[in-house]
Image (tube, rainbow, N blue to C red):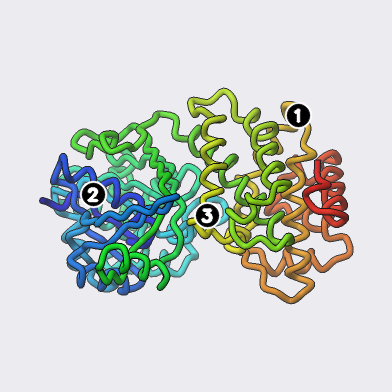
Amino acid sequence: MTTGIVHFGPGAFHRAHQADYIDRLLVEDPRWKIAAVSLRSTGTIDALKAQNGRYTLAILDTEARFRTIAAHNRFFGPGEFAGIRKQLNDPEVRIVTSTVTEKGYCLGIDGALDFAHADIVHDVNDPRRPDSLVGWLALGLADRRNAGLSPFTPICCDNMASNGSKLGNAVIAFAERIDRELARWIAGEVRFPNTVVDSITPATDERLRQVVREATGFDDAIPVARESFTQWVIEDRLPDGSPDFACVGVTMSFDVDAWARAKLRILNAAHSTLAYLGLPKGHETVADAMSDPALSAFVERLVIEDIIPTLEPSPVRLSRYAEETFDRFRNPTIHHRLSQIAWDGSQKLPYRLLDTIVEARSMERPIDRLAVPIAAWILFLERQARSGAPIVDPLADGLAACARSDESVDEILGLRQIFPESLGSDPAFRKAVTDAASQLRRGGVAQAP
């Protein structure tokens, strides 16, 4: 087998998701083994080396299933510049994937490359020893251009809207700072497809290691787990010679945005709603919250009656997607903590709920129910700020100051970094959120519209 893919960020999600697809693809086409690259820590890389690239994937449902994944055959940790660079310049490598979290792309609040970011400052000054993913992609593409090789195709697998477009713009912007000819070549020759990825992947802990040990007899240091549902959508613009992803269940689509909107506005919006309404009722996980009849009924009505109408028409079978989502949420073997979902609300809610509210207003549809999770988030911030508990959010300081105010709803709705002018100054929206906050203070979701 040969190495045809380089992956940056071999954390749990990559090893439970993309690596599972590739592992199955290798049965039919042995060209696509993965070289794993970690730019920050050595733990996973060292464990993969010790286990010859093998680890256990536990698929958690009513009955657990276990698979050995053996998709990786090369491993590079921080500081292994020569090895990473040589691998990226290997003509057999056609794809470079990444799961480095949104912050790993060094983007500003506007989605463009942040040239003030410490890693980008370093890489502009020393582009041959990069710290950032963007810097590595630019260096790898420069080497291939200089060698007369065709470029590899970067495929971003992190949850960002228009993730491929943002990555492409960032790499081109970086290249313009160091070599304008390189920037022009990348813009003309390299494809950065947009993607959607989805599968709930709990963190690996000692409990999972024990389950794997008892089920397989193998003392696995780095097992991973995920739910049985998995989805990978790639924009159908890969160059000739790319892997046949479709043969292992990847959806190749010319309209990735439709899938991204469905995920953000159905699954992710429902997640945030369950978090902000479920936490004050004492629920700890998504499955716990969905076992609450009033809360689950509210979320299902929100999705079916308020969110789906703003997404139609769509190539996605939205009603079926929603039903699959609710079934996934009820899976008791997946311990997806509401407290983690509640983090970073200022960054998540604009895409998960506010865009839907803007469209509902333009369609003259009711927004009373859509306002409830926004109000619940504000009350969540109030409880955190007034109890002295931390607010995990890039805008934490400003949100905490607003949340301590007697006019917390008005103060937070006035934050233009979160609420666009079209909503923040909309009397109907402000009234809907204010009324929802009052209802939640009185009786919780059972009293919500």
Label 3 sits on a secondary structure element that is loop
10 Å crowding of disc 3: few (<14), some (14-19), many (20+): some
Tell me if I can see residue 296 in this picture: yes
Q: Give above or below for 199 relative to 406.
A: above
Residue type at mark 2: give it.
Answer: Asp
10 Å crowding of disc 2: few (<14), some (14-19), many (20+): many
Query: Residue at coordinates 40% horizontally, 44% vertically from top-left?
Result: 230
Query: Residue at coordinates 67% horizontally, 73% vertically from top-left?
Result: 390
**Which residue is most to the top?**
313
Residue type at mark 1: give it.
Answer: Arg
Measured as percent of width and height from the top left, residue 77 is found at: 27, 70
Q: Which residue is mark 2?
A: 23
Choose between 116 and 152: the one closer to the eye. Answer: 152
First in residue order: circle 3 vs circle 1: 3
Q: Which residue is mark 1?
A: 365
Disc 3 vs disc 1: Cβ atoms closer than 8 Å?
no
10 Å crowding of disc 1: few (<14), some (14-19), many (20+): few
Quarter of the figure with residue 123: bottom left
**Which residue is most to the bottom?**
388
* C-alpha separation, residue under disc 1 versus residue under disc 2: 46 Å
First in residue order: circle 1 vs circle 2: 2
Q: Give above or below for 131 relative to 14.
A: below
- Left or right position of 385 against 209: right
Measured as percent of width and height from the top left, residue 185 is found at: 28, 43
Residue type at mark 3: give it.
Answer: Pro
First in residue order: circle 2 vs circle 3: 2
Q: Nearer the viewer, mark 1 or mark 2?
A: 2
Tag of residue 332: 3
